[in-house]
Amino acid sequence: MKMTDEMLAQIRTSVRHAKNSRFYQSHFAGVEPDDIKTIDDFRALPFTDKDDLRDAYPLGLCAVPTDEVVRIHSSSGTTGAPVIIPYTRKDVDDWAIMFKRCYETAGITRADRIQITPGYGLWTAGIGFQLGAELLGAMAVPMGPGNTDKQIRMMIDLRTTVFTATSSYALLVAEEIEKRGVKDRICLKKGVIGSERWGPKMRKRIASELGVELYDIYGLTEIYGPGIGINCDRSEGMHLWTDYMYFEIIDPKTLGPVKEGESGEIVITTLQKEGAPLIRYRTHDITREIMDPCSCGSDYPQIAAILGRSDDMVKVKGSIIYPSKVDEFLAGVRDASSEYQIMIDHLNGRDQLTLFFETKIKDGKARRELEKQVAQGFKKSIGILAKIRAVSIGELPRSEKKTTRIFDNRY
């Protein structure tokens, strides 16, 4: 993204404000905001990463007096200390403005009825969708996740026109509607989908079975939440609201900027955030900037759909799984070897994870007992119920290079 003199001035202001927080006082020790005069000066600033935010727990990121904080949100990670993000009144209002802009970009109006299925609470998703709907003046139906019977009933009885969800839940609901034969009673026109990566096959199925136009919304808790970008009806990419943030695309290995239009990791600097401003925050999301202006006429720049993550993370049933955490878990299981493989499938409308691990135990009864022990430990350590299959040493494939341990077959 090209940097203007006006944006540099905004960044200097944001850096100056960020240094009111305990975290950035330490992280930017020796950094003088007024010395940031060029893009090279900006790129010399250290990155901020999620581990930094965990280390700042609980309120080390807070850059305002705590009596100005009106809300707390937390990221959905399942491991390590939570990431706590404080919001001021202005932060909440700015987030609502961005979300309203997302709805408008998707052609959603105050005449629509928006069914909100993402979760509420510390997670930013549900309440963000609701804030934008209320500011828009549309009817919000704040269902939250699950209870598919009631979801479909409300969808029919309230004549919902917009469905918001994760891609996994959108597919589940689409399949249930098809299974029950009630598609002709559904009034949906649009779907706004976010929170997880999804491929063209899943997108096509959801659009076809729900009979809707789909819009891919972008965001993360650390940067307000969902609503910082969305694709328009031209579907050329996702527009990002650059009056509220500056973004870079970097090579996750060299940490330098990529060439124009090349894929890399998106790094975000907030320009107006008060409660927890973030400077050069590594999202680990892989995408590329679309250099040509969008044919819709919007001046907001675009990024392509998120391809994946630079840190090898997968999300299953709402839980985030890191290979390193599986390594750590199995290291504590006495009779399990270090070699394992994870297969993730989408069967009968639900995500299913199967963990294969090697063991020296040959007796069938003893293996079944070990599988039961691993299943209980996996649920406790990783956060989801998995199918567990013990196999003999050497049965899993080997590689001379880096071994592929996670196979995601949902896309």
Image (cartoon, rainbow, N blue to C red):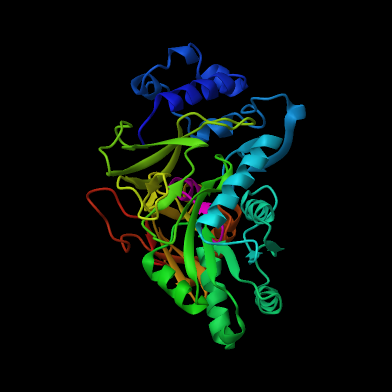
At which x and y percent is residue 173?
57, 74
- Residue found at the very far right of the displayed protein: 67
Of residues 322 and 13, the one nearer the viewer is 13
Q: Residue furthest front?
A: 297
Q: Kindly identify the residue that appears in the image at 28 percent across and 44 percent down.
A: 261
Point out the stretch of residues depicted in magenta.
316-329
Residue 91 x, y percent position in the rendering: 64, 37
Give above or below for 232 relative to 45.
below
Q: Is residue 204 above or below residue 215?
A: below
* Residue lying at 63% horizontally and 26% vertically, measured from the top left: 60
* Left or right for 121, reference 222: right
* Quadrant in which residue 140 is drawn: bottom right
- Out of 184 and 360, give the one closest to the viewer: 184
- Residue 366 visible: no
Q: Residue 394: x, y in percent?
A: 31, 60
| 5 left or right of 13 in image | left
**Residue 328, magenta (yes or no):** yes
- Given the current orientation, which residue lies at the most extreme bottom position? 181
Residue shown at the point (48%, 11%) measured from the top left:
30
On the question of residue 26 being in view, the answer is yes
